[in-house]
Amino acid sequence: MNKIIPVLIFSVLLLVLVGSNQEAQAASMTFSMDTTISSDATIGPGETWTVDPGFTLTIDPLVTVTVQAGGTINSSGDIDNSGNIINSGTIISVNINNSGSGSIDNSGSSMSISDSLSNSGTFDNSGGGSLNIGGSLTTTNSFDNSGGGTIAVVGDITVQGTFNNTNGTIIIISGSFDTNGTFDNTGGNISVAVNITIQGTFNNTNGSINSSGSGNFTNSGNINNTSGTISGTFSDFINAGNINNPGNINLSVLGIFTNTGSFDNTGGNLSISGDIDNSGTFDNTGGSINLSGSSNINNSITGIFDNSGGTISGAFNDLTNFGTFDNSGSSMSISGSLSNAGTFDNSGGGTLNIGGDLSNTNTFDNSGGILNIGGDLTTTISFDNSGGGIITVIGNIIIQGTFNNTNGTITTAFGSFDTNGTFDNSGGNISVAVNITIQGTFNNTGGTITGSGDFTNTSTFDNTGGNISGTFSDFINAGNINNPGNINLSVSGSSINSGTIDNSGSIVYSGSGTFFNTGTIDNFFFIDNSGTIDTTSGTLNNHCGATITNPGTINGQVQEILCIPVLLLPPNGSTETTQTPLFTWGDAAFETRTVIQYEWKIAIASSPNVPIEIVSLSLQSITPIPLVNDDYLWTVRSLDADLSSLPYSAVAVPSIFAQAFSLEINTGTGGEDSQIIGGEIIPLNTTALLLAGAQSFSWMIPVTLSVLGIGLFVFRKRI
């Protein structure tokens, strides 16, 4: 009994010394109750402070506890630090709380915490420090793990404040990572088992963050991944903040890669297995995206997806765009289909390969781009393939709305071409494997369209300077074709024109079928028929001596519509001083017939519908009967022609009169040998007067005088 009492007294006395702010640094100590260190203390080599389970070792503010190399704090309880801990040895504890005024320096040393570390002060694990935590790490102020520091945490890491992991390593074995402060992972490495949540600023320059589990990646802050790496398997990847990725992101996403913020992959690389859903801003300018598996891209109505100068590769399934998608000058391949209900830009050398269908219900720009479609192309609003754009379609092309193919190229390998909108093929080229159907307005000015199935037009087709050619099964026109270009048809089946064809160019027709014309064909230049044309139920007008060569057969009659002559002299609006000026005219520039009968007439300007002389003649000049001083209108029309040499049955159709020229006769004498009789002026020296009856002369058949009230009216006709 006497031997035990001194030991107990020593233990009690030791605790009292520590509790009364006395230095305790010369020996190992065991704390079996809550203990406060109120004065500086040093744990030397080979010395150990032991805290029994259930108790807390508290270090007061401004107090410094130094653990020297070889020294140890071994706590089976907790450590609550408001002062300063400088560790060059080893610290083991269940929980450590480093309060706002506290500072823990574990640089280059070792610390093990079986449960949790809470830091609201300053924690330094840099310089190769080692920190092992069996539970969680929470820091709200300043934490430094740079310079080769290592942190291994079984549970979660939650960061607020600043965290420096430059060239450091963080391993989360089974927990999540959540930072809402300023986190610098420059050159650092972070491995996370479950969720990664970034709400503040995260600098991953040359760093690496990896998920080894299948949690979620959520960013609502700002991530800089310059030359960094983000990788792993995630359930979902959600960016509601800003990610700048001139680095590498390699993801396997079991759910969806969702971007509602800003994702900048300029010059970066994104590899993803999973779907991309963008309703924010996605910039892949000069970047690379590789999609694998059954990935899809959905760009919503608010989404802006910029792939200009970038590359999207991999056999991903479908792309759906409701917003703005820019693939100009870029390359992208889709194994499935593309549906565009927004604005899609593949211009400027962009290359887009689609394994399935392309459906456009808004605006699609392929000007100067390349578009390869393995299925059908359907567009209902606006499509631009101008400026050297190239479209190759395996299936069918179905067009409504507007389509601009100016200087563009369209080819269907096996399908048909059907347009029911406004189509501009100026200078463009269209090659169709099967049927061509035109239901809207088609401008083929300087363009080319070829086919080998049926050609059907029910609307307005302008072929000014253009070319239509092919070997067609049937050729059907129920609309209007304006052809100042070339149409070359070889038709094996039937051809029907129930509309109008206005040809001022060239039409070459051949084939085994009959061309039934039940509408109207107006030819102003050239038709070559080596087949059979049946116009018995329609109208075939050949204007101004245009050419119709007919090695074949034309059933029915061709109407040779004569040209309107060109009035020459006297000039329009001139004044003549003679009563018998010479009237001359010529043929239209494209008139080819040489034996033509004309009809010339002249009337006083005040009574333009009452000619005073009408003459039929084959000459192109005439001297009228003497005219009195007055204002006149004169005109000419082509009346008849010799059609005997034509290789088909024809009938001449007179032209309309040329636009009348005006003329004033002013001899300066007031009208010699003239007298007013019954209100009309006639030259008396060339007319016989009778009160009633008729008199014939060699130049007048007849001259008739009628009693009209108080005077006489004279009408003359010379033939």
Image (spheres, rainbow, N blue to C red):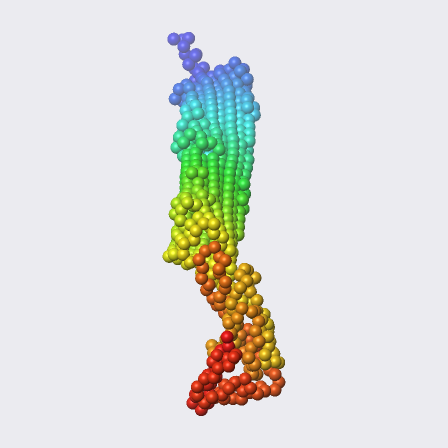
**At 45% from the left edge and 47% from the top edge, which residue is drawn?**
510
Residue 405 in the image, given as x and y percentages of width and height: 49, 47
Q: Is residue 488 above or below residue 541?
A: above
Picture residue at 59% right of the left edge, 79% below the top: 580
At 62% across and 85% down in the image, what residue appears?
668
Determine the residue located farthest toward the bottom in the rendered image: 710
The answer to whether residue 690 is above or below residue 55 is below
Q: Quadrant of the N terminus?
A: top left
Give whichever of 245, 388 is nearer the camera: 388
Q: Is residue 624 left or right of residue 20?
A: right
Q: Residue furthest left?
A: 537
Q: Quadrant of residue 238?
A: top left
Q: Nearer the viewer, residue 310 or 459?
A: 459
What residue is drawn where x is 52% and y is 76%? 602
Residue 684: percent from left, percent from top: 54, 87
Q: How many marks?
A: 0
- Pick the front one: 503 or 262: 503
Q: In x, y percent, where is residue 485?
A: 51, 52
Above or below 180: residue 56? above
Residue 271 makes an appearance in the image: yes
Is residue 282 visible in the rendered structure shown here? no
Q: Position of residue 656 (x, y in %)?
A: 48, 68
